[in-house]
Image (cartoon, grey):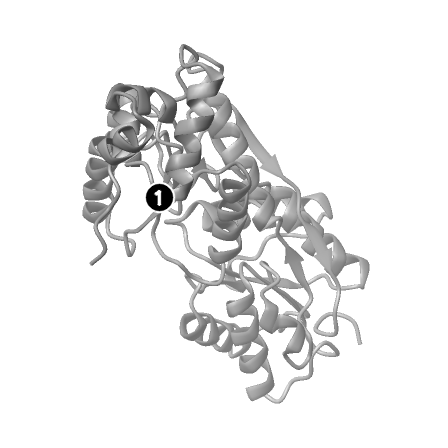
Amino acid sequence: MKKRTTIKDIARKAGVNHSTVSRVINENPAISDKTKKKVLKIMADLDYRPNLIARGLVKSKTNAFALITPDVNLHVAPIIKGISDTCRRLNYGLMLFSTDYWLEESRSYLEVVKNWLVDGVLIYNVIYHKEIPANIKELQKEEIPFVFLNKFIGSGMVNAVGINNYSAVELAVDHLVNIGRKRIAVINGGMMSVDGVERFEGFKKALEKHDIEFDKRLVGEGNFFYNEAYEEMKRILCLNMEKPDAVFCANDLMAIAAINAIRDRGLKIPEDIAVVGFDDLEAGKYFTPALTTIRLPQQDIGGKAIDLLLKIINDPKRSVEDISLESKLIVRESSIK
């Protein structure tokens, strides 16, 4: 292995003390321009790379963020891309931790974050919290800047960036009502997640807006999974009652499952039942029929979260900010022929 160039090597070549080289690296204004240029040239010639951890200890700043997420899936990937692109543009590093949905795992990663040198933390939230969890309170106590990705129960409790689930679901229901559908089923994501709770509440509010009575028999708990959504859609279609003429699904994967269950019952889409999903996954546009869905500003979430985190770092006493981003209805063949 090639021997790594050290500060002492740079100092020897430049004919200065190693502390002078250290001051150049840490951008100390007391160093003259002439010395600075000389040292920087030698650093470039010798391909010297500063030890960022040591530099962080000196400056109390590492230009690095940590991202804690329960999973790296098709839904989270665009958000990570938005974060990564913004970090690259701002010359920040990014450390990624995946908890695999285990609470104990997330606690251990938070311990790592508290002990590592990072300027701030981004936490992708999926669980519906009724109050701030103990491990998040620890971050607040340690005064570690953090921002939640996805909404956090109780606006104003923590800094967060996410989508407005209520207005997004309203777009879906408005569309179904506008094309003449009145008996609308829902395959929800479950009541343990923020998105599941908000999309279900948003669905009921949207029905109320159009004076459509909510029928709990037309509710399926798909928990954001294909197999569960398929079985729930099949169950609803087998009920001894008037069948729905539309179904809203809280994500695209469940919408595809619902379409397959509807087809397997010999029904046509959208003639018999119109289907609307949520997320605008790439696969949805290539499915048959192409999926009507809600397109989320996923990459915007990542970029705005970094912007908010930097504001918190620069002004730790600023008021808590809870940012909601709006989504867009994408109409395709699963709702209109």
Classify 96 as above or below 110. below
Q: Nearer the viewer, residue 67 or 334?
A: 67
Q: Residue at the location (36% across, 27% down)?
A: 25
Is residue 135 among what the camera can see?
A: no
Residue shown at 33%/28% (left/top)? 14
Residue 282 is situated, as x and y percent measured from the top left of the image, at 60, 68
Quarter placement of the N terminus:
bottom left
Q: Residue at x 45, y 72 (%)?
A: 226
Q: Which residue is mark 1?
A: 46
Q: Which residue occupies the foreground of this view, 255 or 11?
A: 11
Q: Could you tell me which quadrant the C terminus lies in?
A: bottom right
89 over 289 or under it: above or below? above
User: Which sits in the foreground, 275 or 31?
Assistant: 31
Picture mark count: 1
Query: Is the residue 26 above or below the residue 116 in the image?
Result: above
Q: Secondary structure at mark 1?
A: loop
x and y percent of residue 113 in the render? 26, 36
- The quadrant holding residue 267 is bottom right
Residue 101 lies, in percent from the top left, at 29, 54
Within 10 Å of disc 1 (Cα), the crowding (few <14, some 14-19, many 20+) is: some
Q: Is residue 110 visible?
A: yes
Image quarter of residue 11: top left
Q: Residue flagged by tag 1: what amino acid is it? A: Leu
Residue name at image x 40 percent, y 50 percent: 191
* Residue 315 on image: x %, y %: 47, 15
| 254 displayed left or right of 54 | right
Tell me: 66 left or right of 311. left
* Closer to the camera in the image, 39 or 188: 39
Q: Is residue 227 left or right of residue 249?
A: left
